[in-house]
Image (cartoon, helix red, strand yellow):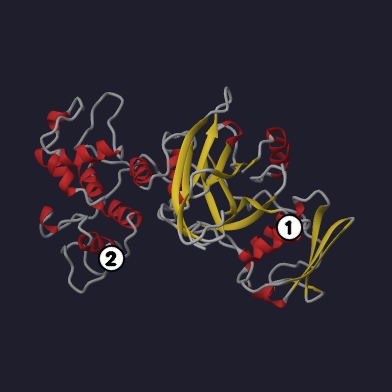
Amino acid sequence: MVRVRNFLALAVALALLGATWAWAAPDPFTRFTVYYVFSAPTEFYLVPVGVVVPATSTPARRALELLIQGPPPGSFLHGPVPANTRILDLNISDGLATVNFSQEITGVGGSRSEALLLAAIANTLAQFETVDRVQILVDGQKTSVGGHIDASDPIQPAYQGVIMRQQFTDISGHWAEGNINAFFLTGLVAGYGDGTFRPNQDATRAEFVKLLVLAAGHQETRPAQASFADVPPQHWAYGYVQSAVASGILVPSDYGANFGPNAKLTRREMAMLMTRARNLEQRAAELRDAPLAYTDASDIPAWARGYIGVVTELGLMQGYPDGRFRPGGTALRSEVTSVLTRYLGMGETNVRLVAPKPNTQVGDWVLLGGVARAFEANVESRILHPDGSEYLRTFTTATEGGPGWGFWAIMFPTPSVTGAQDITVEAFTTSAEDGSVQDLVKRTIRRTP
């Protein structure tokens, strides 16, 4: 077991770098940051990822190798470097890191991708104290890499303008800010073209069905025959509505000939659809006559009582501060994202764990990531052996820091196993008073040899 705790180094290093990693490197591991890419619906960003590797005497080269390799499958990130690129040589002298890549690195497409590639290389190398600028060569020659950006001169690291931070202009301080950012990382939801998310806008049936279908792991289904007259094959939500019908989330007889895709989603309907997505229709029947501890329980229709009982029992939905459930009230976009983060088990307090998903199959590496709100946004992570003993514990820092929500990610090796076995990864914060674990979110994942 290795435990990394150096808060002073963390605060100093990350305040300067805007990165997610602190220097504290007892054997047998070496630590550094690698900058991978997050692809939003309309933009691309770099996310600084803390990395733990077996001890190496050449950390700069190892960091570049992992940048080329890319993060493990199943994360919400991807590598910016074309596959099969090789490092022909790396030399560091007088603050200049000269990297000679093979020709494959020129295979990036578009000026935006090229800019992210160059920034990822420069940022990844400039974290090392002997490097303050980077010269990129291809087969020993100066180059523009992809043909759009001149890289013939040394490159300075770029932390502003390319590092992923708050994506929406209207959610800062909103009660659902963390949930919205976490759900954004799944790639399932996007904001509007003006940079807003509009958290207090009413959600529609079609919007929620799409998100629930995707959150449940289903794909679009496009049969020749439509289930509803007002959701024909050319409708944007057709594939999702039909998938919901095929998986039992939607029952056409509940709605009749028309689904009403643009109708406002009610909270009682959301409870029904969430229950069906979890295949708990039988449990809803059992709870149909059970008491509900809401002050407006008498306003809940008989058909909805069991469904509301299920989502209450699971903690997926809850009442308002005044004790009401408001079954006929319209669900807001902020409420939808919050309910779905609970559905996906991302966490409830100051840490949201987006990756890895439960039961993800992993090999030698695993990436944990999400959003967090904590003092200086410090997030601890650990990985356990199959027997439950601690294999590695370390921490990282979200990109925003301070009282707001920021993005964080960390990648580390997994313990060796004989045959496929379940292991546990955890993300949490620690109490400033006594160091106890709080805000704990955990995942069981499958480690394969």
Image label count = 2
State the residue position of label 1.
122
**150 versus 57 height, above or below:** below
Q: Residue at x 23, y 43 (%)?
A: 271
- What's the CA distance linking mark 2 and mark 1? 43 Å
Q: Quadrant of the N terminus?
A: top right
**137 versus 314 height, above or below:** below
Q: Residues within 10 Å of mark 2 (few under 14, many from 20)?
A: many
Closer to the N terminus: mark 2 or mark 1? 1
Q: Residue at x 81, y 48 (%)?
A: 129
Residue 266 position by quadrant: top left
* Residue 297 picture location, percent across and down: 16, 29
Left or right: 50 as drawn, with respect to 232: right
Q: Residue at x 66, y 36 (%)?
A: 5
* Residue 79 picture location, percent across and down: 60, 63
* Residue 96 picture location, percent across and down: 85, 58
State the residue position of label 2.
239
Left or right: 307 as drawn, with respect to 355: left
Q: Residue at x 31, y 25 (%)?
A: 321
Q: Please, what is the three-letter code of the amino acid marked with disc 1? A: Ala
Q: Please, what is the three-letter code of the amino acid marked with disc 2? A: Gly
Secondary element type, mark 2: helix
Secondary element type, mark 1: helix
